[in-house]
Image (cartoon, rainbow, N blue to C red):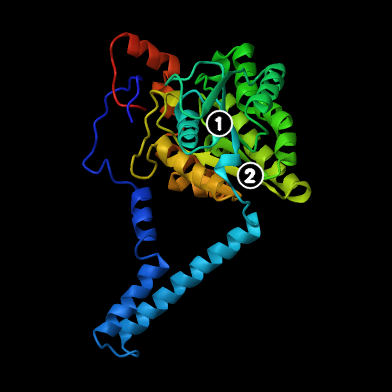
């Protein structure tokens, strides 16, 4: 996916395309898939192998274990998230904050092409100009008056919102001692307070919608572990994660027809974190926005409550805080989580590089 944002040249290792996420994905679709697991004993039987032969017994035991695990996963998700809601894209009105670029724009374009009605809220113009099925509204999500005005316009122009995707975010990338109060206030307002503003504005519409609704919160693993030069960002992401979980509990009691989706992402290949390089592309690969968008779109389409973690380590990040503090310190050094922001230049730095004539693959 190309982009007019510059990226420092990197030396790829011979295993650059390979990551733990890719290996797990391959195994989930082969040896860890019930259908494939049962093919093995069937193949043995096709070779006239007796049912009590050791290879046959082992393959049947493995297939049974995988099938039971799969069934447990289905039951676990049903218990945690309940029944899905019915989704008809022709009746969905999707509101996306920070949708003029990056992940938000990608989701907007996909839904626009598929026939849904999409409203994008952003302070800057859309990168691709106009997009099919997408209506742009200039709006600063840190200003509750602007949100209220735009909400009225959306209901008048497009209909009652049914999906809210809180995607707007900014990154200062400065040490706390180097930030002034204005930097901190803007970061907290954009990354945390704006979620409360949009929810208070659009949630009543979702509640009265005849088709139910879905709330999507884009969070980050940084909200679980923190990182140097990200004190404001980490605090805000921790806040919206806690807010989302509390909101989910409230809606389960008062509005069970509204679904919630929490996205805990690692480092995304977008200009938001331009200049930051992952310390280990195998264990902690940079995530492409298209992969995250696919998971979000699938959750919305299927009407599910969901908790999405990408890449693989993001699904297990809660266990980090269970480790003894000594092991946590070791893990932080190995992951270089507190030094990775030293090369950060941000979106503005990427734009400066573009003006200098440097255009490389998207980050």
The percent coordinates of residue 248 (x first, y second) are 69, 45
Who is closer to the viewer here, 268 or 306? 306
298 vs 281, left or right, is right
Q: Which residue is mark 1?
A: 118
Callout 1–callout 2 Cβ contact below 8 Å: no
Q: Nearer the viewer, mark 1 or mark 2?
A: 1
Name above or below for residue 12 compared with residue 35. Answer: above
181 vs 3, left or right, is right
The percent coordinates of residue 119 (x first, y second) are 57, 27
Q: Quadrant of residue 144?
A: top right
* Residue count near mark 2 (Cα–Cα under 10 Å), binned few <14, some 14–19, many ≥20: many
Indicate which disc residue 15 carries: none
Mark 1: secondary structure: strand
Label located before the other in sequence (1 or 2): 1
As drawn, the residue found furthest toward the left would be: 14
Mark 2: secondary structure: strand
Q: Residue at x 35, y 78 (%)?
A: 59
Q: Quadrant of the N terminus?
A: top left
Q: Residue at x 56, y 40 (%)?
A: 90
Indicate which disc residue 260 carries: 2
The percent coordinates of residue 337 (x first, y second) are 45, 34
60 vs 232, left or right, is left
Q: Is residue 281 in view from this perspective?
A: yes
263 vs 58, left or right, is right
Name above or below for residue 83 compared with residue 329. Answer: below
Who is closer to the viewer here, 127 or 175? 127
* Residue count near mark 1 (Cα–Cα under 10 Å), binned few <14, some 14–19, many ≥20: many
Q: CA distance from mark 1 to mark 2?
A: 18 Å
């Amino acid at each position: 996916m190309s982009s007019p944002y510059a990226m420092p040249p990197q030396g790829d290792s011979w295993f650059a395309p390979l990551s733990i996420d890719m290996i797990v994905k391959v195994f989930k679709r082969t040896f860890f898939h019930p259908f494939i697991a049962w093919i093995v004993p069937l193949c043995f039987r096709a070779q006239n192998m007796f049912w009590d032969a050791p290879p046959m017994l082992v393959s049947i035991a493995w297939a049974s274990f995988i099938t039971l695990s799969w069934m447990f996963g289905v039951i676990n998700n049903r218990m945690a998230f309940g029944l899905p809601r019915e989704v008809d894209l022709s009746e969905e009105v999707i509101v996306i904050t920070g949708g003029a670029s990056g992940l938000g724009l990608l989701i907007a374009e996909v839904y626009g092409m598929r026939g849904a009605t999409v409203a994008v809220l952003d302070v800057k113009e859309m990168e691709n100009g106009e997009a099919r099925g997408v209506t742009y509204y200039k709006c600063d999500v840190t200003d509750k008056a602007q949100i209220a005005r735009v909400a009225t316009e959306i209901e008048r122009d497009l209909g009652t919102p049914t999906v809210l995707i809180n995607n707007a975010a900014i990154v200062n990338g400065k040490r706390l001692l180097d930030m002034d109060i204005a930097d901190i206030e803007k970061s907290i307002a954009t990354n945390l307070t704006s979620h409360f503003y949009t929810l208070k504005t659009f949630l009543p519409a979702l509640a009265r919608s005849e088709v139910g609704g879905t709330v999507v919160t884009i969070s980050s693993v940084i909200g679980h572990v923190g990182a140097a030069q990200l004190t404001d960002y980490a605090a805000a992401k921790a806040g919206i994660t806690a807010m989302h979980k509390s909101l989910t509990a409230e809606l389960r009691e008062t509005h069970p027809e509204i679904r919630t989706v929490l996205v805990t992402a690692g480092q995304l290949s977008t200009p938001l974190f331009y200049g930051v390089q992952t310390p280990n592309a195998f264990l902690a690969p940079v995530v492409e926005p298209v992969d995250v968008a696919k998971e979000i779109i699938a959750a919305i389409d299927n009407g599910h409550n969901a908790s999405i973690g990408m890449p693989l380590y993001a699904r297990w990040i809660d266990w980090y805080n269970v480790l003894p503090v000594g092991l946590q310190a070791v893990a932080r050094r190995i992951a270089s989580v507190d030094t990775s922001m030293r090369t950060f230049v941000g979106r503005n730095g990427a734009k400066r590089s573009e003006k200098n004539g440097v255009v490389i693959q998207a980050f």
